[in-house]
Amino acid sequence: MTASTLLQGKVVIISGVGVGFGRDLALAMVENGAQVVLGARRDSTLQSVAAEIEASGGECVWRTCDITEPEQCEALAQLAVDTFGGLDVLVNNAFDPGVLKGSPYEWEPSGDPVTWEPLLTADLDVFRRAMDVNFFGTLNMTRAAVPHMQTRGEGRVIMINTQSSMWIKPMHGAYASSKGALWTVTKTLARELGPLGIRVNGLHPGFIDGIPVSKSINESADRIGMPVEQLRQAIAAETCLGYLPPGDELAGAAVFFASDLARPITGQALAINAGHWLH
């Protein structure tokens, strides 16, 4: 089933595997020859993605993992070693969207509408939760993975960041500030882990065409009284390429960073947003 051997022999952990970009990342890694270890808070989504991978002939294992719990991160990293003999790549995809109620990345149809708040009146517990997951949780997962990469003599850490950390908009402060901190620590880790042969880079997507973004656009269109397709077309028109890229296209950038093609690259931010925002 493997489309290429670009990642043949590589063992890849992906956190935050769900119905959106995490699934796309997992499938892309497998299609390029990797063995993957899947982590997420819900076993139902893990089982679904694992079934897709196995049906295509790929190799994977999974376990539930809340990245805010260091011991769960350590268990996920150990699962990679115990099952596949080592660890080469960590894709830090798990995140908290920094919203007051509900979440555009949790897809129960009866979920509450998403609510963002301005900084001066925001519930700062929302900021704390976003930092706990997006910054400290990602550090937990990275600290758990790096010793196993060090045993290999090199490795890759890929931070799934966001264009929101560089293109600042009002009322997205909890998400943007936590991801901004993640971008800073990405560069710090690149400096500190470079002597170990471990490359650390960030991917900064914009709107990812798929279930999560569709729900967010639907809610926004309803809130402002605009037809959904009109709003979607208006957002797409802001990009240089005139469309919202799907997750399976964006996942190719993660495959690149995970591969030997990116061997001389570390400490970099790559915008994967169809030219929605240029930096």
Image (tube, helix red, strand yellow):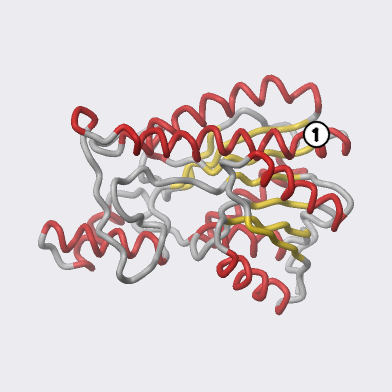
Q: How crowded is mark 1: few (under 14 residues within 10 Å), some or many (20 or more)?
A: some
Secondary structure of the residue carrying tag 1 is helix
Q: Residue at 61% of width from left, 35% of height from top?
A: 201
Q: The C terminus appears in which quarter of the rendering?
A: top left
Q: Which residue lies furthest to the bottom in this view?
A: 55
**Position in image of residue 58 (x %, y %):** 76, 70
Q: In which quarter of the image is residue 131?
A: top left
Vertical position of residue 240 compared to residue 153: above or below? below
**Position in image of residue 41 (x %, y %):** 56, 56
Q: Residue at 53% of width from left, 34% of height from top?
A: 269
The foreground one among 174 and 195 is: 174
Vertical position of residue 220 compared to residue 197: above or below? below
Q: The N terminus appears in which quarter of the rendering?
A: bottom right
Q: Residue at 53% of width from left, 62% of height from top?
A: 18
Q: Which residue type does callout 1 highlight?
A: Pro
Residue receiving disc 1: 147
Vertical position of residue 72 compared to residue 244: above or below? above
Vertical position of residue 90 compared to residue 83: above or below? above
The foreground one among 204 and 69 is: 69
Figure disc tally = 1
**Position in image of residue 76 (x %, y %):** 72, 50
| Position of residue 130 in the picture relative to residue 193 (left or right) | left
Q: Residue at 31% of width from left, 32% of height from top?
A: 124
| Position of residue 189 in the picture relative to residue 101 (left or right) | right
**Position in image of residue 166 (x %, y %):** 39, 32
The foreground one among 86 and 44 is: 44
Q: Quadrant of residue 114?
A: bottom left
